[in-house]
């Protein structure tokens, strides 16, 4: 189990270095399939971990490195769930990239950084040590920086810098928070920090890092701006990797680890709700399709945080399921946006309309994914949102649950608005047909996954239930101690 | 095949056929409709075959969502009607595919709606019911879309209103789960037991009422009626949707909660408002589709009041009214589809005398009319009498009086419609295709014979409604004070119409002066301009609030953030400019340097 997890990390991380070599060797066309192979292998390597994780088995390994620094891994249901979901979506995005990125100038570089990005995510997921968590965190920030500015226009580079400075600044605060924790408890090992109460200063610092990475209001503005990146990258940022890192870190550090004071918990919940509502409001007034979807991500991340921060059974299960449901749906939506942008040469929804006739598969896929984000059954988004809000009610946070429901109404409004503006009504501009078969195929697969993860919810549910059980075991064992 | 497994067929077969029809029958919708008809028949046969065994399945799925389905005598009775509506809707669709802008989408949505109807009625789990219900909402959205580009706004409105009310209901169900400690459909929580119980009731009531088309969630119905295919409107908003909404309201008011005076007041307020906000505009309306839509909403007020009186008679009346209304309103929509096909529109002026030239469609409409004004022996008579009896015995005299006024106006509206359809002068247009005539005629006969049918099921209805002994429907046929009230309703309704008609050039203009009257006129004008439309008001409020938040909160944060970042970027320019120069080799050097650091960390201590 431990070596398997190590392979999940190392295959994309070290394998990414082969991609530029291939580029230099004149095998430019091979770099895409290589990236797909590496990321796909990383995903396939998570499959054997599913059985033990479902059985409730956990694993830990530790490689001593330098003085008090050791590379230690933690393999439990939470880590396996995250790794499986993120690598699956990343694999699909890599496949889509084969059709999307082939006409651009720096193809090998693109695939190199994307693969490195996925490797960093895998490393972060299995890390048990705060220092390594930080290290992988920053690798992802650097990769993200480069990928947002991929098209090299000065405006894009500025937006890439903005993303980097916000997430990097947040991460520096987080590192300071880790240092405070170390001075208090003398360890960077997350499992040893379990049950220890985190001080207010350290909490604020760590949360600054988490919120900046997960694009939570007021540290969210880099994410809508990051829409200048290729659609595959925005999809990767929103659906599979970057914003999910903050959520995972919170789940790992606070749901399964350190204890937060009840007053601080209330403030965090209010902040998450505010983030969900403010960004939903912005999405309702946005006419740029990628910015609208980005605001939607900020809003849905707020929802997921609500589930995690209420620290209840339903809340935790709902939040984890929503990470998956949102990943599939938002991945699909961004890739649909990529096809639409290719076909119309614009991101402005006021210049679209009537595209359903020309892009029926993309249209159906978009609708399925949008309905999932809006929380309409039988899509997975409904079930996970239901669990999150039920978790809030379970935790006695009825006012927040009510406001979360109202935010869900705004979500429904902007999702339907986007579908209507893009696909329905009369055509308001030139448009080609569907994208390449590979691109449309991937979008359709994500739509099917969105539908199937609702109908077949029991499969992911069983895994997150084990993860919740392990969280509760941690709490009970601490109380016993 | 076991009786348990037969329970899955009504849900899975229409779904499977729907998925098959959408991609493969785009070019041949009639063949798709034939297949759909087969699916409906298969679903009906399955539950009829399973009914004698009263099967039940209980499969744990994810937490809270137990796949619990059962088929009791009461459910079989309801599903019998549901099957009939579905069968005739599909028969009608078979003959009307050419009238529908997107027939393949229409078929797909109809079949999904049929599957979700079975899900809602067969399930014993509240959450599975919600899932089935939402599936129905999505089907409704697509069904309205099948009317073409002009139907898109109405579809959007229906989904937003339905989705919003369902979100509220979900919150109510979560609160209910807390107060009933996980209790299901038969928990019987007192609404007086605490604020959380009361609010749970209000929220669930809103959600269920919205599905039935109750005020203030009704405004999408007239909009949809104008643009969606007649067969679609007859099948969903006019019949199945009402059935589901009232069915769930019945469960809410009779099984999940025990209503106190405050909860009953809520029901009465919404019920009475529903009756009047729609029946008064129906008097002056000049479009038959819209009249039928408005008169599809006002009966919901009667049903809600029937459920609120907390008498067995009221509850039984509400359920029977739900079935009768579905039968007569779908008949009317089917027939209207035929009329407008020939007349080229549904404006009353165009339809003057059309029933004379389309005798079979006209006959069907007339049968439905008899049930709509609650003439004996129709199901409408039995249902309305039971509701009034419940209000009388429950001591709700004001409610009774207001319902009687509503019933009088209802008679006046339909008297106008009948006078228009049979006005002198129509002729020479010819009848609709066979399938389009057969469906409304059969449904019209069911609406008329409803009173007899319901009387035969008296034992079941009395038991389900909570009567202490059978004979609930039998009492209606005896002469009582309510018989006099009913006769008064018919007489007053026709007299009001006659008075309004006198001096007008055509029946269509009968109530036209109301639209220019000093008080009612401006109010009706504002209603026509959607000034009272809850959806429009809600959208404006949401738009204003979110715009303020967007401009003065989100954008402000961005401006401040950009300022801070510009300063940071200026200070770090030498570093960033050099590091992020767009040269590939540069980034590779970064990565390799990082890789060397990792190698050092991994093997440095060993060295």
Image: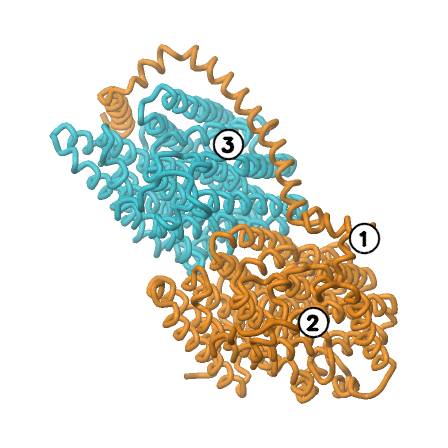
Chain colours: A cyan, B orange
The answer, for residue B275, to whether it is visible in the render is no
1 and 3 marks in contact (CB < 8 Å): no
A466 in relation to B604, above or below: below
- Closest to the camera, between mark 1 and mark 3, is 1
Give whichever of A189, A437 is nearer the camera: A437
Q: Which residue is mark 3?
A: A211
Q: Do marks 1 and 2 both belong to one polypeptide chain?
A: yes
Q: Position of residue B212 (x, y in %)?
A: 64, 64
Residue B48, placed above or below residue B296: below
Q: Which residue is mark 1?
A: B517
The residue located at (24%, 23%) in the rendering is B584
> Which quadrant, please, contains the C terminus of chain A?
top right
- Residue B419, label in figure: 2
Image spot of residue A105 (x, y percent): 23, 28
Q: Earlier in the sequence, mark 1 or mark 2?
A: 2
Give the secondary structure at mark 1: loop
> Which of the chains bears the disc numbered 1?
B
- From mark 1 to mark 2, how far is it between C-alphas? 23 Å
């Amino acid at each position: 189990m431990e070596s398997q997890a190590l392979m999940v990390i190392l295959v994309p991380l070290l394998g990414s270095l082969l991609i530029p070599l291939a580029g230099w060797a004149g095998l430019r066309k091979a770099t895409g399939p290589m990236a797909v192979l590496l990321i796909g292998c990383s995903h396939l390597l998570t499959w054997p971990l599913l059985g033990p994780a479902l059985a409730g088995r956990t694993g830990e390994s530790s490689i001593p490195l330098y003085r008090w620094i050791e590379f230690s891994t933690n393999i439990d249901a939470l880590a396996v769930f995250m790794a499986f979901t993120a690598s699956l979506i990343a694999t699909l995005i890599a496949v889509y990239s084969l059709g999307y990125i082939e006409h651009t100038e720096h193809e090998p570089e693109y695939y190199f950084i994307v693969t490195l990005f996925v490797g960093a995510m895998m490393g972060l997921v299995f890390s048990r040590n705060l220092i390594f968590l930080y290290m992988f965190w920053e690798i992802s920030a650097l990769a993200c920086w480069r990928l947002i500015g991929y098209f090299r226009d000065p405006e894009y580079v500025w937006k890439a810098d903005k993303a980097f400075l916000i997430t990097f600044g947040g991460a520096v605060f987080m590192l300071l928070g880790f240092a405070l924790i170390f001075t208090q408890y003398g360890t960077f090992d997350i499992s040893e920090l379990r049950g220890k109460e985190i001080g207010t200063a350290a909490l604020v610092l760590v949360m600054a890092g988490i919120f900046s990475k997960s694009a939570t209001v007021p540290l969210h503005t880099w994410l809508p701006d990051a829409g200048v990146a290729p659609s595959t990258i925005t999809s990767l940022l929103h659906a599979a990797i970057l914003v999910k890192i903050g959520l995972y870190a919170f789940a790992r550090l606070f749901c399964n680890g350190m204890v937060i004071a009840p007053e601080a918990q209330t403030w965090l919940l209010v902040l998450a709700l505010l983030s969900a509502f403010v960004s939903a409001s912005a999405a309702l007034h946005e006419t740029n399709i990628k910015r609208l979807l980005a605001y939607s991500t900020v809003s849905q991340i707020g929802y997921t945080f609500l589930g995690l921060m209420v620290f209840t059974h339903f809340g935790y299960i709902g939040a984890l399921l929503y990470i998956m449901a949102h990943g599939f749906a938002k991945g699909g939506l961004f890739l649909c946006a990529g096809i639409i942008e290719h076909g119309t040469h614009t991101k402005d929804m006021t210049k679209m309309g009537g595209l359903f006739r020309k892009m029926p598969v993309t249209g159906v896929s978009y609708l399925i994914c949008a309905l999932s984000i809006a929380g309409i059954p039988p899509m997975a988004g409904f079930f996970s949102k239901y669990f999150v809000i039920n978790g809030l009610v379970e935790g006695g946070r009825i006012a927040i649950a009510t406001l979360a429901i109202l935010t869900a109404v705004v979500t429904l409004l902007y999702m339907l608005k986007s579908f209507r503006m893009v696909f329905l009504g009369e055509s308001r501009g030139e448009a080609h047909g569907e994208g390449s078969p590979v691109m449309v195929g991937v979008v359709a697969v994500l739509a099917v996954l969105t539908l199937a993860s609702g109908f077949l919810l029991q499969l992911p549910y069983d895994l997150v239930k084990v993860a919740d059980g392990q969280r509760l075991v941690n709490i009970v064992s601490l109380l016993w101690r | 095949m076991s009786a348990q497994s037969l329970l899955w067929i009504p849900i899975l077969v229409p779904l499977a056929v729907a998925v098959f029809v959408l991609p493969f029958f785009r070019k041949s919708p009639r063949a798709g409709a034939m297949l759909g008809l087969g699916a409906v028949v298969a679903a009906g046969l399955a539950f009829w075959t399973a009914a004698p065994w009263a099967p039940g399945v209980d499969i744990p799925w994810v937490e809270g969502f137990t796949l619990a389905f059962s088929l009791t005598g009461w459910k079989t009775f309801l599903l019998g009607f549901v099957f009939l509506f579905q069968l005739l809707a599909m028969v009608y669709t078979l003959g009307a595919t050419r009238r529908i802008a997107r027939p393949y989408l229409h078929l797909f949505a109809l079949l999904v709606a049929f599957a979700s109807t079975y899900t809602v009625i067969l399930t014993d789990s509240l959450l599975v019911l919600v899932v089935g219900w939402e599936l129905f909402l999505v089907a409704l959205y697509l069904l309205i879309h099948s009317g073409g580009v002009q139907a898109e706004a109405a579809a959007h409105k229906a989904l937003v209103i339905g989705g919003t009310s369902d979100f509220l209901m979900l919150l109510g169900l979560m609160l209910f789960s807390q107060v009933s400690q996980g209790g299901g459909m038969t928990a019987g929580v007192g609404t007086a037991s605490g604020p959380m119980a009361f609010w749970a009731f209000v929220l669930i009531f809103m959600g269920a009422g919205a599905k039935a088309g109750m005020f203030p969630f009704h405004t999408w119905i007239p909009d949809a009626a104008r643009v969606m295919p007649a067969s679609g409107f007859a099948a969903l908003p006019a019949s199945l949707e009402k059935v589901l909404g009232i069915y769930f309201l019945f469960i809410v008011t009779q099984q999940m909660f025990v209503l106190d005076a405050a909860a009953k007041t809520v029901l009465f307020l919404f019920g009475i408002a529903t009756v009047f906000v729609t029946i008064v505009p129906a008097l002056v309306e000049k479009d038959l589709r819209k009249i039928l839509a408005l008169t599809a909403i006002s009966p919901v007020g009667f049903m809600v009041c029937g459920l609120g009186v907390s008498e067995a008679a009221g509850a039984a009346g509400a359920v029977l009214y739900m079935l009768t209304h579905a039968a007569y309103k779908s008949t009317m929509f089917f027939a209207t589809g035929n009329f407008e096909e020939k007349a080229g529109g549904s404006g009353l002026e165009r339809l003057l005398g059309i029933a004379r030239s389309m005798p079979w469609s006209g006959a069907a409409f007339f049968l439905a009319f008899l049930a709509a004004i609650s003439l004996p022996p129709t199901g409408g008579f039995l249902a309305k009498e039971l509701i009034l009896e419940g209000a009388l015995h429950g001591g709700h005299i004001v409610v009774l009086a207001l319902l009687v006024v509503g019933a009088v106006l209802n008679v006046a509206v339909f008297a106008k419609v009948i006078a228009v359809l049979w006005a002198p002068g129509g002729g020479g247009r010819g009848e609709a295709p066979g399938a389009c005539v057969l469906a409304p005629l059969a449904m019209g006969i069911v609406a008329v014979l409803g009173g007899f049918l319901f009387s035969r099921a008296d034992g079941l209805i009395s038991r389900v409604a909570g009567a202490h002994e059978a004979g609930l429907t039998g009492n209606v046929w005896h002469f009582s004070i309510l018989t006099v009230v009913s006769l008064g309703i018919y007489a007053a309704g026709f007299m009001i119409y006659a008075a309004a008609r006198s001096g007008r050039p055509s029946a269509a203009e009968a109530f036209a002066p109301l639209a220019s009257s000093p008080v009612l006129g401006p109010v009706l004008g504002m209603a026509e301009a959607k000034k009272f439309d809850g959806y429009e008001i809600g959208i404006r409020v949401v738009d204003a609030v979110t715009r303020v938040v967007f401009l003065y909160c989100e954008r402000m944060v961005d401006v401040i953030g950009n300022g801070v970042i510009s300063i940071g970027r200026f200070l770090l320019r030498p570093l960033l400019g050099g590091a992020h120069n767009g040269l590939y080799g540069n980034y590779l050097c970064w990565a390799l340097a990082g890789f060397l650091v990792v190698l050092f960390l991994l093997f440095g201590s060993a060295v």
